[in-house]
Amino acid sequence: MLDISDFRIPGGTSADIAEEITAQTSAGWTTGLIHLNSSLVARAAAFDPRIRQSVTDGSARLLLGRDPVHADVTVIRHPTVLQHAADQLPPISTEHVLLVADTTVIGTDGTVEYDPDQITRLVQEHLGRTPRWAALSAEIRSQLEQAAPGLELVGDDWVNASDGDVASAEVRPERLGHQVHRDRLRQLAGLQPLNPDPGQTTASPGSTASPGSTASSARRSAGAGQQDRPALLLISSNGTGMGHLMRLMAYGRRAIEFEPQVLSMSQGVGAVGAMGMTYEYLPSAGALGMDSRNWQQIFTERVGHALDRIRPSIVVFDGTWPYAGIEELRSSHPDPLWVWSRRGMWMPDRGGEQLSTSAWFDEVIEPGDFAGAADVGATTTASATRIPPVTLLDADDLLSRDAARRELGLPADGPLALVSFSGGTVQDVGSDTAAAIGACRKLGIEVCVTRSVVAPHVALPPDVHVVNPIPLATYQRAFDVAISAAGYNSFHELLRFGTPTLFIPKRNSSLDDQDRRARWAADQGWSHYATHVDTDGTAEVLADLLEHGEEMIARIARQDPGNGAVDAAKVLADLHARRDVRRGTW
């Protein structure tokens, strides 16, 4: 057996590989490991402890260098790893290749996470075989079938080898455990158990990573006691945009007294690496196609592992509905203090029931809203430490107009419009995008559309520029006007950083009152508002923004109290200081 993955990835993928190694060993098979340094791990890091243990106790052999490798069966975990790191593979010959798809093809924000056809070609090129694909859930299977109809998919959803693994309970509860793993591989490959081959070279127990790796066992994975700074664990819920994740990154960037690490359910979590922070991905219930009650057990287990490994002083959760597992985690891991970062502007008469979970937290931080005076939601009467509006970046972090256009490959001259509708139904996004393009053309404005809007559903004319830089705000000065949804992140970045904007509230938001936020801004003369995009009406609004946009932006600049991320960092530092006084430093 040959397992290929990025073995630094904490959580589910590495845990499942470790269990599969145990199952393979008990069946008398030799397991080789080939590690690929992927973009899913932000910085050089040690292997997951469970993988290291498998190498240490001889259950698996870490194969280093460029020597040719032969395996009867090769299993590749996490498609994104191979898509971006296939060039690190040594020569491999194998009889069978199975590619386990752990995550959905399309993220919840519409971003394409990986290309199944491209990955199939990479396997054919580097391993000489056409892979069979195995989906971890029904949702992943459905997306694979839509994205690449020609894939060879195994008949059943992939059941993790972990005994009692709740991730598989919903798919086929009778097919759990190590025996399942042994049986399915025999069926897939037509194999009987293999005798170990003593010819392969093994790595020493302390070995890390593959050729070119700078992984170090001195990394913080050994525990918080080896750090100069206390650990700060930042957990974001899934959501449909990037707001939860961006707020946490804003806190971590300014919390210089801490060593921040991010655990996120957002499939856009790779953005964390660009800011130099360590991160790990925990698939949400939606990404796995699971019932939320079963998924809660996964959440509790994975976060518990992270708490054991990172030993944070403080945990910050950003989301509108804290998961039930947090209460259990507080009991099983009593040392960290917990903070709920809970934005306001909830829709009237919605969400009040989750405010009772404030009792699970030592502190509640409420990021402010430029439209806060219009807020009539449940949080307005709830206790919280209220801070100014939070954005990841400050104005000094943005590129100049010329530099931003140059880096994005956009025209150096002429007006440019940014069109960015996050989430929404395919029909809404497609019709709004088409109308926005038509409105811009009437005025001779070139159009840039964010990739998350169009992929994979909306066909675009060839003269439309598609951009997807993260964070987008870095390049915001490239654009003269914007047509955007009114989610927390986009709303505050566009206004704070001076882009005249027409806000189109998201029409299927479950809790965020985008309509009230956008209406308030328009009433103050900061921006324009519409419920939908139509070509003629939008063209008139864009013309007004081009003529009067600077005056409108000046009004909000006079009202901006500054970036609340600085205030949040101070709250965390003060909380840590009080914690040390009360408990003693550890």
Image: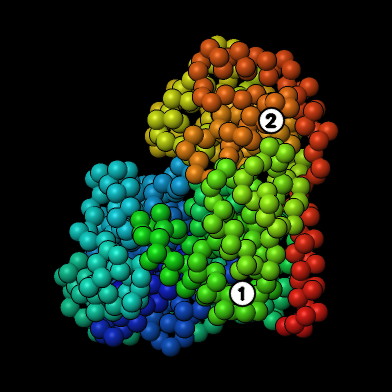
Of 511 and 151, the residue lying toward us = 511
Disc with the residue nearer the chain's start (1 vs 2): 1
Label 1 amino acid? Answer: Ile
**Position in image of residue 468 (x %, y %):** 55, 39
Rendered image quadrant of residue 217:
bottom right
Label 1 with label 2: CB-CB less than 8 Å: no
Q: How crowded is the residue under tag 2: few (<14 C-alpha within 10 Å), some, or many (20+)?
A: many
Please give the name of the residue rendered at 69% of the width and 80% of the height, measured from the top-left corner.
226
Give x and y (percent) for residue 30. 31, 80
Choose between 379 and 246: the one closer to the eye: 379
User: Looking at the image, is mark 1 or mark 2 nearer the viewer?
Assistant: 2
Q: Residue furthest bottom?
A: 57
Viewer-nearest residue: 583 or 539: 583
Please name the amino acid that badge 2 sits on. Ala
Q: Secondary structure at mark 1?
A: helix
The colour scheme is: rainbow
Res. 584 mark? none
Q: Estimate how packed mark 1 is, as few (under 14), some (14 to 19) or many (20 or more) residues with alpha carbons within 10 Å.
A: many
Q: Is residue 343 above or below residue 258?
A: above
For the residues marked 1 and 2, what is the alpha-carbon distance in whole angstroms?
Answer: 42 Å
Residue at image location 72% in from the left, 73% down from the top: 230
User: SS class of the residue under badge 2?
Assistant: helix
Q: Which label is found at residue 521?
A: 2
Which residue bears the numbered disc 1? 310
Q: Position of residue 124 (x, y in %)?
A: 30, 53
Q: Is residue 259 visible?
A: yes
Q: Is residue 120 left or right of residue 454?
A: left
